[in-house]
Amino acid sequence: MIHIMEAPKLYPALNSTTSHIESEADNEYPLMGLTPSLEGQLAKQGFRGESVFYTLFMILLGGSLTYYMLGKALEPLNKLNYQMKNTCVHNLAEDIEVPQTKDEIGEITESFNDLTHKLNASFLMQKHFSQNAAHELRTPLAVLKTKVDVFKKRKNHTPEEYDSLIEVVETHTERLSELVKNLLEMTNMEAIELNQTISLHHLLLDVVHDLDLLADEKGINLLVSGEDVNILGNYNLLHRAFYNLVENGIRYNCESGLVNLSLQDRKEKVIILIADTGIGIPDDMKGSIFEPFFRVDTSRSRENGGAGLGLSIVKSIINKHKGQIVVTNNKPCGTVFEISFNIERQHKDS
Ligand code: ADP
């Protein structure tokens, strides 16, 4: 059976045969049309409404759940962020609580605590350094001020009194300028280039030559021995370092003592020993000897004019040349400073 329902309406110009078939069909099946029934339309609308509602409901539910879960997951991170924001220079020593969970956030917290410890140590060191520097600068200034104040109180002075004042002013201004020079040297070392080929044997001979007079005054013998080795570095800096060490060897020596400088060419490194027969350094102080402003005996060092910066500068210079310095006892008495440079990295030329 053929059902053609809409064709006549759509194509009114169809031939009579077609019209005939249509009229027959119309009689047999009353017009059904494409428009759905009222119930159908209502059901369809209801279905649409429900789907929109359920879709929105699912989106809202899913969104809220995701928001809640993300919030829970990010809670430790937010807490850590809050604690990090509240960390400042005044509470660097306080640890942030490390979460018990062994996850990435725990690791980040531990790393952050490590970082704040290092920063705190560095801040403390700087604070200590500035305090010491201020103290060292204040002392000669205070002496100068007192001397001048006392001098001003009387009108007439003898030539001896003038000379005495000038001597005090000279000594303390020298001390001040030496201190300022040392402080500047310590801070300006970074920019210096290490590209000179230096014969260590010649360098030690130069140092000994420069300190000859001081050694003679104290009746100290200076000896240089060992093979020559070349290293890459900065001549002036290394001269300064060895000068300080040998000068200390003379200053803290005994009458008719000896300062022995020896070079040892080992396979991968060169070792320079500076051994004196002096008063020695107590074992419990050897660890602090390279700290800025450290003195074993404050009164004794002041007589010699040192501010306790010499060995600190020496260590900075040696470290800048990727070398190492250690201090040990000499036998039967005195001190040995052992400096080593790795010559594999610094072209051994001889
Ligand atoms: P200073 O300018 O006071 O000598 P240094 O940094 O050179 O400062 O030395 C620090 C301290 O180490 C000195 O005050 C001194 O007590 C001690 N010292 C350094 N070298 C020697 C040495 N060769 N023998 C004995 N003591 C030394």
Image (spheres, helix red, strand yellow):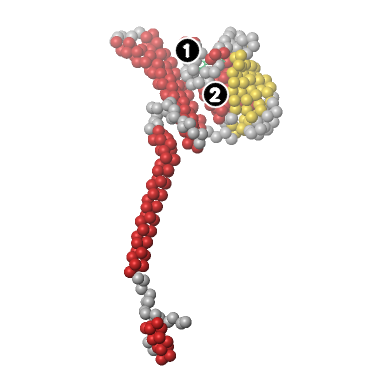
| Residue 236 in sight from this viewpoint | no
Q: Secondary structure at mark 2?
A: helix
Ranked by sequence position, the earlier of labels 1 and 2 is 1
Location of residue 318 by image quarter: top right
Name the residue beneath numbered marker 1: 298
Residue 65 place in picture, x, y as percent: 41, 46
How many numbered discs, if any? 2
Q: As shown in the figure, which amino acid type bears the numbered disc 1? A: Thr
> In terms of secondary structure, where does tag 1 sit?
helix
Residue 41, by quadrant, is: bottom left
Badge 2 is on which residue? 314
Q: Which mark is residue 122?
A: none
Image x and y of residue 50, in percent: 36, 58
Q: Ligand 1 near label 1 (Cβ, under 8 Å)?
A: yes
Residue displayed at 38% across by 59% down? 51
Q: Amino acid at mark 2?
A: Val
